[in-house]
Image (cartoon, rainbow, N blue to C red):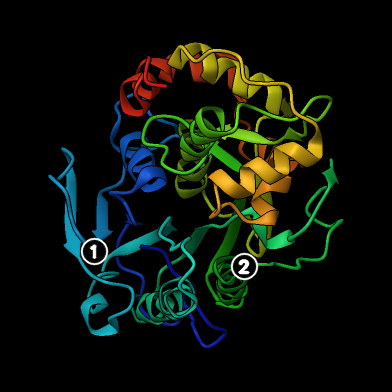
Amino acid sequence: MRSEASARGNCATGPHTGNTVLVVGGTGFTGGAIVRHLTSPGGTRTGGGSTPPVRVLARQPAEPAPGTEQVSADLTDPRSLRGSCAGVDTIIHAASYVGSDAKRCHDVNYAGTQALLEEAATAGVRSVVYISTTAVYGHGPHRGPDETALTPAPVSAASRWRLAAERAVLDTDAEGVILRPHLVHGHGDRHVLPVLAQLLRRVGGLPDGVSGRSSMVCVDDLARVAVALARSPTEQGAGGAVHHVAHPRPVRMHDVLDALSRTLGLPPGPALTAAEHRRRTTEFMPRLSDHQYALLTQDHWYDSSSIWRRTGLDPGPGFEARFAAAAEWYARTLGAGRQ
């Protein structure tokens, strides 16, 4: 579940009465990590102060995390959102639909965000942090651009409506901040390394002489950023900002595949030309789009220095160390030893 909003959303017109942080999609991959960091005694803090109350909004709530309040609501049903923002200071919006159903992309990623922002306006929410994606830029290659260097040109319905959601967040009277990660990995990952595991098993890695470099971020580091923004006093003029979120050092896809292959105990794949590799990928992974294939074989890395400056956070140790910490989870989830 994830959403977007329209320019009609106005998040600062109502009376502001609380300091609760509302995590939308707080039972998902990214949202769950954000909730963990918000409620952790040693979690990310910026500017001091006590830990604020945390409210988790999800379509299918899980067992409540200690110290959180659960709200069951669906972004595609505006009536279910009523009252969800009462007493909320900051919304971290980490819900989205990334599938191929174009109508659902609109209903969740755009109309749902719009409904959320309209509810937030009634409650006088101070700030909104929206987790978006660098996929809004469309086709690469991209080699180190900052947030001002590219004009968004999304190629999928999911990314088009997430871009529309970004604009809705930035058009509110609340302080809107957009976070654009590229490839997010770590405990709970269902889209990045699981797809690479399929590639290793069905095709056998990348073609000879081809390896794009990509921006990557561990979900826990992305969560640290979102939480730091939620806990920071809003600086005058700080809203309306868009930030890439990635470790500053891009990662070679060959290195990612090598690490995953070792973890899963997979033998080396066959040596393939670029043409043969693309043919085999089309045959054995037909749902992998041309754009997704290009993410593996072309450079897609971005300058993320602005978010680390703004938050004052250390970016962390990078892919190798973060993957090692999650390797046991990946091995168990993806089936180490299975060919």
249 horizontally vs 339: left or right: right
Question: What whole-number distance in Å separates the C-alpha atoms at marks 2 and 1?
Answer: 24 Å
Q: Which residue is mark 2?
A: 156
Query: Residue 295 location in percent, x, y?
Result: 70, 44
Q: Nearer the viewer, mark 2 or mark 1?
A: 2
Residue 46 in view:
no
The numbered disc on residue 316 is none
83 horizontally vs 214: left or right: left
- How would you rate the neighbour count of disc 2 (Cα within 10 Å): few for under 14, some for 14-19, many for 20 or more? some
180 horizontally vs 71: left or right: right
| Tags 2 and 1 touching, CB below 8 Å | no
- Determine which quarter of the picture holds residue 144: top right
Query: Residue 205 location in percent, x, y?
Result: 64, 27
> 186 or 309: nearer the eye?
186
Q: Earlier in the sequence, mark 2 or mark 1?
A: 1
- How would you rate the neighbour count of disc 1 (Cα within 10 Å): few for under 14, some for 14-19, many for 20 or more? some
Q: What type is the residue that disc 2 sits on?
A: Ser
Q: Residue at x 66, y 30 (%)?
A: 247
- Of helix, strand and loop, which one carries label 2? loop
Q: Which residue is mark 1?
A: 59
Query: Residue 201 location in percent, x, y?
Result: 50, 28
- Of helix, strand and loop, which one carries label 1? loop
Residue 254 in view:
yes
In the rendered image, the vertical position of residue 314 relative to residue 283, given as above or below: above
Q: What type is the residue that disc 1 sits on?
A: Arg
- Determine which quarter of the picture holds residue 44: top left
Q: Residue at x 31, y 21 (%)?
A: 332
303 horizontally vs 218: left or right: right
Image quadrant containing the C terminus: top left
